[in-house]
Image (spheres, rainbow, N blue to C red):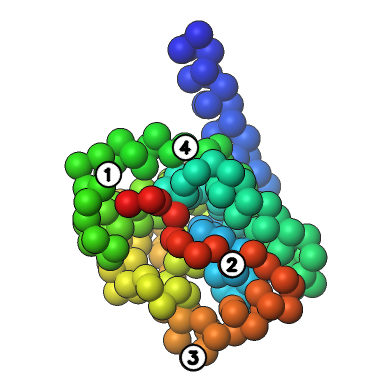
């Protein structure tokens, strides 16, 4: 049974990589970006901002989100954003399974860390490393994350992690602080316009 589960996991990973590769082969002259998205509200502004310069595929990999019902709700809202906004209609979603155990294993000794501490850094590393790995496997030109649009996320730390992973995987990382130049404010406006669900907490229960 374990071997069969592993086999299915490998097949799904191969499917994700193939989707990215197919996307990369039709860039229409733009660099192909794999954009890690944490939720629809954050993605709303970031995708709109990046679409003129990049051919974007979105990766929804957020094993920190608890419970699973909340995870499913956020993923559904991201899908609705991509389907219903004119500027995002050409964006492909690469879905991942709910892997909360991956997050729990990584932070099992850090559950009492305060918001913004070592547990958050580990969470950023998990999500960005998966993005870098899928980017490399799929032949993307560059990867990025929507996380820095939040006023609660440390863009300097995110960029440091992204650049380290860029060197390890050989894929360019887009340094960013999307909250600047009214980015966060615009994400709130877009969320209201498209009636997006805005969650009240980042993801984990601490």
| Residue mark closest to the camera, 3 vs 1 | 1
**Secondary-structure class at tag 2:** loop
Q: Earlier in the sequence, mark 4 or mark 2?
A: 4
Q: Which residue is mark 2?
A: 198
The residue tagged with tag 1: helix, strand or loop?
helix
User: SS at mark 4?
Assistant: loop
In terms of secondary structure, where does tag 3 sit? loop
Which residue is tagged 1? 107
Query: Around disc 4, counting alpha carbons within 10 Å, would you say few (fewer than 14), some (14 to 19), or many (20 or more)?
Result: some
Going by the picture, which residue comes out furthest to the top? 1
Residues packed near mark 2 inside 10 Å, few (<14), some (14 to 19) or many (20 plus): some
Where does the image place residue 74, in percent across and percent down from the top left?
Answer: 60, 55
Q: Is residue 32 or residue 65 the one in the foreground?
A: 65
Q: Nearer the viewer, residue 100 or 93?
A: 100
* Badge number at residue 181: 3
Residue at horizontal 62%, vertical 35%? Answer: 15
Q: Looking at this rendering, what residue extends furthest in the bottom direction?
A: 181
Instruction: Please identify, in this view, whether the residue under mark 1 or under mark 2 is nearer the observer.
Output: 2
Question: Label for residue 99?
Answer: 4
Residue name at image x 50 percent, y 8 percent = 1
Residue 82 locus on image (x, y percent): 72, 62
Describe residue 46's horizontal placement relative to residue 168 as left or right: right
Whole-Å distance between the Cαs marked 4 and 2? 22 Å
Q: Residue at x 38, y 50 (%)?
A: 205
Number of residues whose C-alpha sits closer than 10 Å to that of mark 3, classed few (under 14), some (14–19) or many (20 or more): few
């Amino acid at each position: 049974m374990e071997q069969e589960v592993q086999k299915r996991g490998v097949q799904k990973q191969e499917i994700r990589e193939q989707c990215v590769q197919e996307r990369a082969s039709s860039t229409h002259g733009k660099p192909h970006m794999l954009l890690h998205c944490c939720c629809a509200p954050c993605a709303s502004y970031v995708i709109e901002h990046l679409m003129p310069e990049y051919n974007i595929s979105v990766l929804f990999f957020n094993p920190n989100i608890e419970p699973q019902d909340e995870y499913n709700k956020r993923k559904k809202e991201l899908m609705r954003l991509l389907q219903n906004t004119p500027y995002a209609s050409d964006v492909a979603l690469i879905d991942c399974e709910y892997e909360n155990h991956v997050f729990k294993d990584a932070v099992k000794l850090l559950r009492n860390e305060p918001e913004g501490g070592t547990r958050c850094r580990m969470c950023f590393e998990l999500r960005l490393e998966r993005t870098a790995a899928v980017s490399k496997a799929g032949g993307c030109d560059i990867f990025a994350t929507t996380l820095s649009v939040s006023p609660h996320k440390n863009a300097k730390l995110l960029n440091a992690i992204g650049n380290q992973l860029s060197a390890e995987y050989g894929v360019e990382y887009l340094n960013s602080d999307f909250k600047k130049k009214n980015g966060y404010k615009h994400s709130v406006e877009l969320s209201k316009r498209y009636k997006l669900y805005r969650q009240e907490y980042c993801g984990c229960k601490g």
